[in-house]
Amino acid sequence: MPSRKSSRKLSPSRGRGSRGMEQMLVFGLGDELYGLDVIHIQEIVERPVIHYIPRAPARLLGAVNFHGSIIPVLDLAAFLGFPPGEISPRVVVLPFHLCSLALAVHSTQRIVPIDVDALMPIDQERQEENCIRAAISCKGEIINILDVPSLLARLEKQP
């Protein structure tokens, strides 16, 4: 049984730079890259032990012990309708109401600075369907910027 090797705490003060910059955690879902503003990230946890929850929806991989609290682990790819893929050995923990929520993604890549002025708008249907607020081209790759408030609101609406 794997144990939690390490984790990285990200403070909100590191989330925003000067001149309209945001720091984004870049991660993969299927063949696409996504960005998550680090201001929304509580911590990145490596190799957590995920405990199975009987009769839980398929999008929930289970639960982890996070600093003494039991929090659900959401398979973000399944939640957004992607085909199954290999899950990263890391989970991204977000604050969610009075508790936290862990997102399992296919891969975590890097943290990059993003110029807010360079964000490209996307169509409304794609925004709502995939919880994306914008996209950006970075080093020849398109990164879809996840809309965390929209994602959390959509989560609350689903049983």
Image: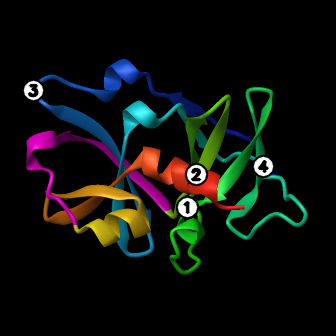
* Residue 145 among magenta residues: no
What's the coloring here? rainbow
Provide the residue designation for mark 2.
103
Magenta residues, start to end: 107-122
Q: Earlier in the sequence, mark 1 or mark 2?
A: 1
Q: For the residue carrying disc 1, how many other residues have a C-alpha within 10 Å: few (<14), some (14-19), or many (20+)?
A: many
Q: Is residue 148 left or right of residue 121?
A: right
Occupied quadrant, residue 64: top right
Q: Position of residue 147 (x, y in %)?
A: 38, 50
Q: Nearer the viewer, residue 156 or 59?
A: 156
Q: Name which residue type carries label 1.
A: Leu
Label 4 vs label 3: CA separation? 39 Å
Q: Position of residue 157 (x, y in %)?
A: 62, 57
Q: Is residue 143 above or below residue 156?
A: below
Q: Is residue 119 left or right of residue 104?
A: left
Do tag 4 and tag 2 residues touch (Cβ < 8 Å)?
no
Q: For the residue carrying disc 2, how many other residues have a C-alpha within 10 Å: few (<14), some (14-19), or many (20+)?
A: some
Q: Is residue 138 visible?
A: no
Q: Name which residue type carries label 4.
A: Ala
- For image coordinates 67% across by 28% down, the residue present is 98
Quarter of the image where the C terminus is located: bottom right
Label 3 vs label 2: CA separation? 29 Å
Label 4 vs label 1: CA separation? 14 Å
Q: Nearer the viewer, residue 63 or 130?
A: 130
Do tag 1 and tag 2 residues touch (Cβ < 8 Å)?
yes
Provide the residue designation for mark 4.
63
**Badge 4 element:** strand
Label 1 vs label 2: CA separation? 6 Å
Do tag 3 and tag 2 residues touch (Cβ < 8 Å)?
no
Provide the residue designation for mark 1.
76
Provide the residue designation for mark 3.
19
**Badge 2 element:** strand
